[in-house]
Image (cartoon, rainbow, N blue to C red):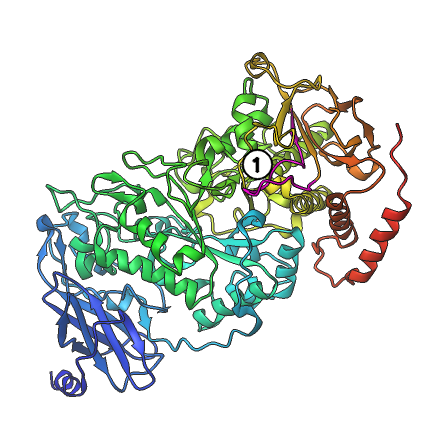
Amino acid sequence: MANILKQATRLGEGRPFPLGATWDGIGVNFALFSANATKVELCLFDETGEEELERIELPEFTNEIWHGYLPDARPGQLYGYRVHGPYEPENGHRFNANKLLIDPYAKELVGEIRWNPAHFGYVMESGDDTTFDERDSAPFMPKCRVIDPAFTWGRGETSPAVPWDRTIFYETHVKGFTKLHPAVPDRLRGTYGGMAIKEVIDYVKSLGVTSVELLPIHAFVQDQHLVDKGLANYWGYNSIGFFAPEPRYAATSNSIKEFKEMVAHLHAADLEVILDVVYNHTAEGNERGPTLSFKGIDNASYYRLMPDEKRYYINETGTGNTVNLSHPRVLQMVTDSLRYWATEMHVDGFRFDLATILGREPHGFDEGGGFLDSCLQDPILSSVKLSAEPWDCGPGGYQVGNFPPGWAEWNDKFRDTVRAFWKGDEGKLPELAPRLCGSGDVFNKRGRKPWSSVNFITAHDGYTLHDLVSYNDKHNEANGENNNDGHSHNISWNHGVEGPTDDPEIKALRERQKRNLLATLLLSQGTPMLLAGDEFGNTQNGNNNAYCQDNETAWLNWDSIDEDGQALIEFVRRVIAVRQSFPMLRRGRFLSGEYNAEFDVKDVTWLTPAGDEMADGHWHDGNAKCLGMLLDGRAQATGIKRPAMDATLLLVVNSHHDVVGFTLPEVSGGSVWRCLVDTNAPDPDEVPRVNTGDTYMVTGRSLLLLALEPEGKTSFALRRAARALRSVAETPAPVSFSEEEPVAEAEVEAAEEAEVETAEKPTA
């Protein structure tokens, strides 16, 4: 008691803002929101986090904020809170001062949870959450640490600010990407530091992707039921700290500095950093879950509770609880967190897990709800990339296309339609056409752009690309749930053998199908998202729910890259180079197919294999599996009434099992088509140029992209593409992770000019 009184005499009242622990160069201000608490104690720990040195009652309560100022506290100080108040589960209150609580605004955590019955506010052994547990949880809890935010950014301070139309997301996992990477030193494998090394960044950059999207790196909890089974929460969708980097991904004791260094290195390579964030629920579960932070600070404010039975939680997430973004202080916490990561940690955007919940008010999903409005009007948040997973398991949870302007959305319609088409399902052409065009039927409203559709074939949740073409059924036995977890409707096809095979025909077909799926993704309008490892055929051995596999099942296996994998990487690089070379493939306006009389052109024309324009009968022919998409380079590209100067392109897709003869259309301005992509040809440059009106034999289950060559000359767009493709060919992706001499820019330009001057004229 004497020690506590001594502390009280040196404790100032401090300020209610900013929330959290803030060092001002002299001391530290502590501020914590709790509307229903009766007392808040600040607990200080020694540098090991094992000994609780002092408990100090915060002296002031202003606007529901408890606050105090310690003039002799410094960065590095470990702390936590004990919050007093009623333990009345029936009224939604679960205060228990025996439980040490994590500050919701903690910038750094030290240590991790070591599961013990003391973590629970009730007597866990009884199973009755209305009981009260008096055991101290502090010995088993991580501790918050006061930080000094100072950091020298250097060249990595400036965001690459990649325009949406050029954005290509690359979804990956900090640990899984680097854990088995042969170029990453052992001490850095699986860490932020590992993501920052030159060989890793050089490889990512070589692919042509623009934005590295990291699975959750907010501090999260290892679920007790997984730990008990010898498994782990690998994906990290179990947040407990919205401001703190996950400490297990740090190779050093300073996770913030290491994270910032990773961002700085990626920025220096002109790569954006996008965070997958989980604000819809926390790791505290339902009424029988642990008391780690929010539940013990102010349960009734932080969570959505059943209106008539406040003992129970509204569970729209499938995880036991739902964060209450309708409460202004909770909304403030989430938006403060986003601004912190954007301004202090310099990330470039966010992908929101189960984002429908963030837009759901008590009356239901509302695109004008508090959180969505907050992002739209905020000068910081409205300037970064915002991408929604637009569904959850609550009522009215499927909201694809219903987020407001300024948001991009994961488009599962694209995923499912493209998978079904290449699987060979019948009657898919009417569904495929709008997906190739950026899903204007879903997103073309309120001035939204084609980039609003985040197109993907695979993601962390589900099969990898290799497994999508290798398995008919999921194989999740290692997850310990008798293979009952994970989706069963995968729209996958093993092509004749379940899993690995030595059959050369099946292997060749699988590789072509990978190229078909990847090319469709990268050549469609919208924003492509590539799952890391798909570019070289990474496998999870048929596991489509590897959330708990923090091991070789889910980590990328770099040593598995064989000749097929290397060839697939080079294919991806080539197609990305083509996409970035032609604005027609990433237009800022939705393709409409309407005739523009002023320019005598349609932006898109759909063709049958005979070269005729598709009619209603063609669209509704269930057996039709081959389609041509003609993109006219003269089509108006912006609201300014002038013709574009892009190349005219022809995309042909054929999911029929056999060869289809496709008559190449005659288009004004050119008489010869040049092949840029053929998923059946190892080197499209060796495919002869084909005259308009001639027939191109399209291999069964394959895709083509051709460009119209203007009469007697090479267009600017084709010159740009030729340069990009030459660069790809001359500088292979560094999968061997050895230093290679880059081709000098001057040599590339000289070679390009020489080729243009000596190019043979197309033959009739």
Residue 718's image quarter? top right
184 displayed left or right of 216: right
Question: Is residue 193 positioned above or below 658 on the image?
Answer: below
- In the rendered image, residue 758, in percent from the top left (x then y), is placed at 91, 46
Name the residue nearer the viewer: 340 or 296.
340
Name the residue nearer the viewer: 396 or 136.
396
- In the rendered image, residue 650, in percent from the top left (x then y), is placed at 69, 31
| Secondary structure category for the residue under label 1 | helix
Q: Which residue is mark 1?
A: 467
Q: Residue at x 33, y 75 (%)?
A: 146
Residue type for callout 1: Asp
Name the residue nearer the viewer: 480 or 586.
586
Q: Quadrant of the N terminus?
A: bottom left
**Secondary structure mainly formed by the magenta segment:** loop
Res. 548 in view:
yes
Which span of residues is magenta-colored? 628-646
Q: Crowdedness of circle 1 by 10 Å Cα count: few (<14), some, many (20+)? A: many
Question: Is 516 within the magenta?
Answer: no
User: Which residue is situated farthest in the front direction here?
Assistant: 598
- In the rendered image, residue 213, in percent from the top left (x then y), is placed at 50, 53
340 displayed left or right of 435: left
Question: Is residue 130 positioned above or below 9 on the image?
Answer: above
Q: Quadrant of the C terminus?
A: top right
Question: Is 634 within the magenta?
Answer: yes
Q: Residue at x 70, y 59 (%)?
A: 737
Name the residue nearer the viewer: 731 or 338.
338
Q: Residue at x 77, y 34 (%)?
A: 681
669 displayed left or right of 762: left
Res. 683 in view:
no
- In the rendered image, residue 351, in percent from the top left (x then y), is placed at 43, 50
